Image (cartoon, grey):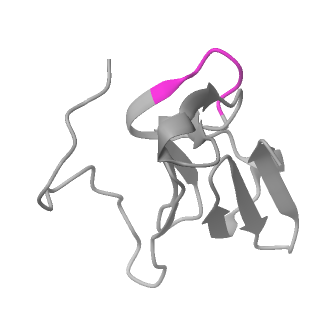
Amino acid sequence: TREKQCDRPRRGHTMQAEANLRSTLAAGTQHSVFIDGVGRLFSSGNDEIEVGDDLDSEEALAVNGLLGHGEGVTQLNTPTRLSSPLGERAVSVAAGDGHSFAITANGAVWSWGDG
């Protein structure tokens, strides 16, 4: 079951940050990815994306691995920590309809989802 849509801003999960590092986030259609103040990755949302040519023909399509926690994890209601690739600190994230990217402090690019 899907949670009720929110028509007003509401406070969500707080991401702890060190004073000299900024937290950042990126939002896809049905999921979000976050970096906390120390470079740890988190994600939340669900693995469904809407596909179709117009509003009348849209249907939900599940994208395995969209949240980055492996197959079988299809919905996360709160930001949940991803295992860090090789223990590296993330510095940037991006999210699309069915995929996400992270860039680490040493310049490595990591991706997950569909695409």
The boundaries of the magenta stretch are 69-75
Main SS, magenta region, reads loop
Q: Can you say whether 2 is above or below 44 in the image?
A: above
- Occupied quadrant, residue 10: bottom left
Q: Residue furthest bottom?
A: 20
Can residue 15 be seen at all in this image of the molecule? yes
Task: Tell me the quarter of the image containing the N terminus.
Answer: top left
Question: Is 39 above or below relative to 91?
Answer: above
- Image x and y of residue 24, in percent: 48, 71
Q: Quadrant of residue 48 in the image?
A: top right
Left or right: 29 as drawn, with respect to 64: left
Tell me the residue at 25%/30% (across/down).
Answer: 3
The residue lying toward the viewer, choosing from 102 and 8, is 8
User: From the viewer's perspective, is residue 81 above or below residue 60?
Assistant: below
User: Where is residue 54 shown, x and y percent of the image?
Assistant: 56, 49
Q: Nearer the viewer, residue 91 or 60?
A: 60
Q: Residue at x 64, y 48 (%)?
A: 53
User: Residue 111 location, x and y as percent?
Assistant: 80, 52
**Count of marks overlaid on the render:** 0
In-front residue for pair 29/69:
29
Inspect the magenta stretch and tell me whether residue 59 lies in it: no
| x, y percent for residue 113 | 74, 41
Q: Residue at x 27, y 56 (%)?
A: 14
Residue 58 visible (yes or no): no
